[in-house]
Amino acid sequence: MAEISFDDFLKVDIRIGIVTRAEAFPEARKPAIKLWIDFGGEIGERRTSAQITAHYDPQTLVGRQVMAVVNFPPRQIGPFMSEVLVLGVPDATGEVVLIGPDQEVPIGGRLH
């Protein structure tokens, strides 16, 4: 495992957002869902896609709070521009489970 400094960690801007829209992404090479996530005033709404179809359907994601890295450069994924990276961990079979708070918190809050 590579070590990083605390200053390196501080460069990663991880925020809480709320999913405002979600839809299937059939053009993706692997099954994925497009997400629109609101991070509040300073950042606003950003888009991403995630390979999370094993545990989530688009309609169940709207209103869910998720953690995401908001300061990566945008990345083109097929016909869709991904602007943030939602965070998750693999379950026992390797399928992604999203990370979010266990209580509702104000959107835009930064992980520390």
Image (cartoon, grey):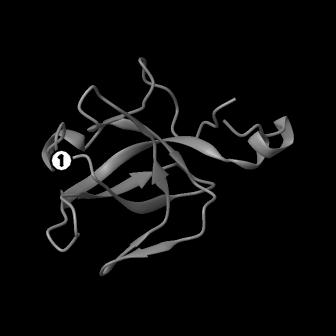
Other-residue count near label 1 (Cα within 10 Å), few / some / many at <14 / 14–19 / ≥20: some
Against 2, residue 112 (above or below) is above
Q: Residue furthest bottom?
A: 79
* Residue found at x 23% / y 69%: 28
> At 31% from the left edge and 79% from the top edge, which residue is drawn?
78
**Quadrant holding the C terminus:** top right
Measured as percent of width and height from the top left, residue 26 is found at: 14, 69
Residue 27 vs 96, above or below: the answer is below
Q: Residue furthest front?
A: 1
Q: Nearer the viewer, residue 98 or 62?
A: 98
Q: Position of residue 84 (x, y in %)?
A: 49, 58
Q: Tell me where residue 90 sits by quadrant.
A: top left
Where's the N terminus, which quadrant? top right
Pointer 1 residue: 53
Question: In this rendering, would 105 be left or right of 42?
Answer: left
Q: Is residue 90 or residue 64 the one in the foreground? A: 90
User: Helix or strand or loop: what does disc 1 sit on?
Assistant: loop
Please name the amino acid that badge 1 sits on. Thr
Q: Nearer the viewer, residue 112 or 95?
A: 95
Position of residue 46 in the picture relative to residue 6 (left or right): left
- Residue 103 in the image: above or below residue 72: above
Number of on-image labels: 1
**What percent of the width, then of the height, locates residue 74?**
53, 71
Q: Tell me if residue 67 comes above or below residue 46 in the rendering.
A: above
- The residue located at (29%, 28%) in the rendering is 91
Residue at image location 63% in from the left, 33% down from the top: 111
